[in-house]
Every structure is written in C-alpha cells, then in structure tokens.
Image: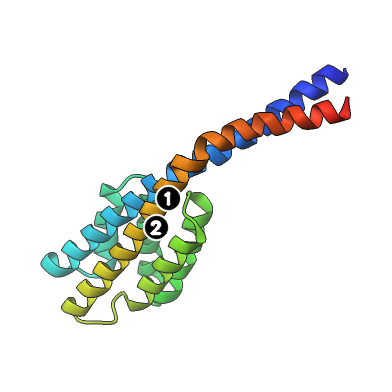
Amino acid sequence: MQWIGALLFIGTTTLAGFDISKRLNERPRDIRQMKNALQMLEAEILYSQLPLPDVFATIATQIPQPTGSFFDGIETSLRQHADLHDIWDKHVEDLIKRSAFASSEGEILKQFGRTLGQHDFEQQQKHIYLTLKHLDRELDEARDQQFRYSKMARTLGLLCGLFIVLLLI
C-alpha cells in the first residue's frame, strides 16, 4: 500500500511538472495569436471601417482558440452592452485564466483596451503598433523562458516527487 501511494505521489508531481512545461510552451503561441489578431484588428479598422462588434466577429472566426473565443465573447457582450472598456477588461481577465498568458500580457491588453475606440484611425493605428511592440518584447521573454525552463520543469516534477518519497520512506 505504501508503494502505491509513493507511485501516485511521484505521478502527481511529474504531471504538475509537465503542466508547468505545457504552459511555458503555449505562452509564445498565445502571444503570436494575439499579435495576429491585433494586426487583423488594425486592418479591419483602417480599411473596412466596420463597427467594432462586426470587426470582433470577423477576427473571432479567423483566429484559433483561446484568442478567437476572447474576441467572440467581446463581440457578444458589446451587442448587449455599450461600455467597451469594462467588457474588454472582463474578457482580458477571462483570457488570462483560460490561456497561458502572464499578467504582464494582461496589463498590455488592458492598456490597449482603454484606447480602443477612443481615437481617430491614425491614432488608433499608433496604439495598435505600440501594443504589438510590447507584445514582441513579451514574446521574446516567453521564448527565452520556454527554452530555459520547459525541460527543467518536467525534470523537477519527477525529481521532487522522488525526493519527497525517499524522505518519507
């Protein structure tokens, strides 16, 4: 019975390490998806000049999850309520919980949400460009963390489980 418990504990810590590694591997992908979505937002705002709910609906159909559902949720909420800033912040918080985004990406997106729909086309384009630059910096950091810590997290999960089991036996 003691060995079964030890194996379950080692399995649990190993899975925790793999989960951390998975989040580190997904973070650069999620940031790239958001950058693509913001570039699409820029193109839709500047060239099609559709209302924001329609722009968000278009982006939601073209970007994979979880970013696609982020824009879909904003579009649905905007059709029911009119306060874009509060809706944007709420959906950014939900996105951080459902994706591998760190809080720093959340802050960048929240800052962008405060400017969305508040300026003319040229100023809006500048805000999108600034947000993309900030996300580029975060993408570089995410890739660096992925390279440094992904394999280590998997290994440490297993080793921590083994260490604790050896201490308890």
Q: Residue at x 33, y 55 (%)?
A: 34
According to the picture, the residue beneath numbered tag 2 turns out to be 138
The answer, for residue 131, to whether it is visible in the render is yes
Q: Which residue extends farthest bottom?
A: 119
Using the image as rendered, state which of residue 149 and residue 10 is in the foreground.
149
According to the picture, the residue beneath numbered tag 1 turns out to be 142
Q: Residue type at mark 1? A: Ala
- At mark 2, the secondary structure is helix
The N terminus: image quadrant: top right
The C terminus: image quadrant: top right
Say if 118 sits above or below 94 in the image: below
Say if 4 sits above or below 112 in the image: above
Q: Residue at x 83, y 17 (%)?
A: 3
- How dense is the environment of label 2, judged by Cα within 10 Å: few (below 14), some, or many (20 and up)? many
Q: Residue type at mark 2? A: Glu
Percent of width and height locating residue 166: 82, 26
Question: In the figure, residue 115 lies in which quadrant?
Answer: bottom left
Say if 65 sits above or below 70 in the image: above
Question: In the figure, residue 162 lies in which quadrant?
Answer: top right
Image mark for residue 132: none
Question: In the figure, residue 56 lies in which quadrant?
Answer: bottom left
Using the image as rendered, state which of residue 156 and residue 86 is in the foreground.
156
Using the image as rendered, state which of residue 129 and residue 49 is in the foreground.
129
Q: Residue at x 19, y 81 (%)?
A: 120
- How dense is the environment of label 1, judged by Cα within 10 Å: few (below 14), some, or many (20 and up)? many
Percent of width and height locating residue 37: 28, 56
Percent of width and height locating residue 5: 82, 24
Q: Would you say 120 lies left or right of 13 here?
A: left
Asked if disc 1 and disc 2 are in contact, CB closer than 8 Å, the reply is yes
Q: Would you say 141 lies left or right of 123 here?
A: right
Q: How many marks?
A: 2
Q: Would you say 106 lies left or right of 136 here?
A: right
